[in-house]
Image (tube, rainbow, N blue to C red):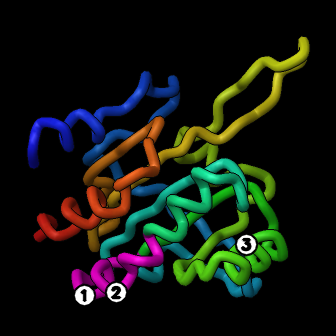
Amino acid sequence: MERADQASLRTTERPPDVLQAGQPAPLFSLPDADMETVDLGQFRGKKHVVLYFYPKDGTPNCTLEATDFSDHEDEFSRHDCVVLGVSPDDCLCHAGFRDQHGVSIRLLADTESEVCRKYGVVHEKEANGSRKSCITRSTFVIDKQGTVRHVFYGVNPRGHAAQMLDLVRSLR
């Protein structure tokens, strides 16, 4: 990887309760845009997983990230990898977003942000004198054994899917 690519893979300051590379990926079950349950454990022993968290369907950066991962979905699949996107939006919002933008990867609804908390991607933001929970754009590369291999907080979505594909290619 060239120096510019390495710089774009650096992350912002990590939240206090974060997942580290080498730890087991927390298991979860969440509904997708079609209201079908996706269980992270179903991929163990079969597929690598790129699990990315994003703030909200339909915003420019979230759309860029989802469509970019979708554009590379066949390549991820060739390397025994599935891409899952998670946000606090509900299934109907995900379905509309998917259909409007041609997103082919599975989008999971974490409406209570329970999985977001397990992965340490929730942060507090102050606006107009009140505090609000927000999602830090983050990505976790999980190997077939269920171990987190790479962790990225504060992701820049431009070119991120291609960078994650390079990392998946290097998994053995």
Residue 120 magenta-drawn? no
Q: Is residue 14 visible?
A: yes
Image coordinates of residue 29 in percent, x first then y, are: 63, 71
> Which residue is at the front of the view, 105 or 140?
105
Residue 61 spot, x, y in % from top left: 58, 51
* Residue occupying image coordinates x 34% and y 65%: 146
- State the residue position of label 3: 97
Sort mark 2 into few (<14), some (14-19) or many (20+) by Cα contacts within 10 Å: few
Q: Residue furthest right?
A: 129
SS label for mark 3: helix
Mark 3 is surrounded, within 10 Å at the Cα level, by few (under 14), some (14 to 19) or many (20 or more) other residues, namely many
Report which residue position mark 2 lands on. Answer: 74
Residue drawn at point x = 48 percent, y = 46 percent = 138
Identify the mark at residue 78; answer none if there is no mark.
Answer: 1
Residue 143, placed above or below residue 9: below
Among the 4 quarters of the image, the one containing residue 31? bottom right
Q: Amino acid at mark 3?
A: Phe
Circle 2: residue type:
Asp
Name the front one of labels 2 and 1. Answer: 2
* Magenta highlight: main SS: helix
Q: Looking at the picture, which amino acid does disc 1 mark?
A: Arg
Q: Are marks 2 and 1 in contact (CB under 8 Å)?
A: yes
40 sits left or right of 168 in the view: right
| Mark-to-mark CA distance, 2 and 1 | 6 Å
Q: Residue 143 at x, y = what percent?
A: 27, 66
Residue 123 is tagged as: none
Region of the chain picked out in magenta, as a range: 69-82
Is residue 72 shown in magenta?
Answer: yes
Quadrant in the picture for residue 117: top right
Dots 3 and 1: beta carbons under 8 Å? no
Callout 1: helix, strand or loop?
A: helix
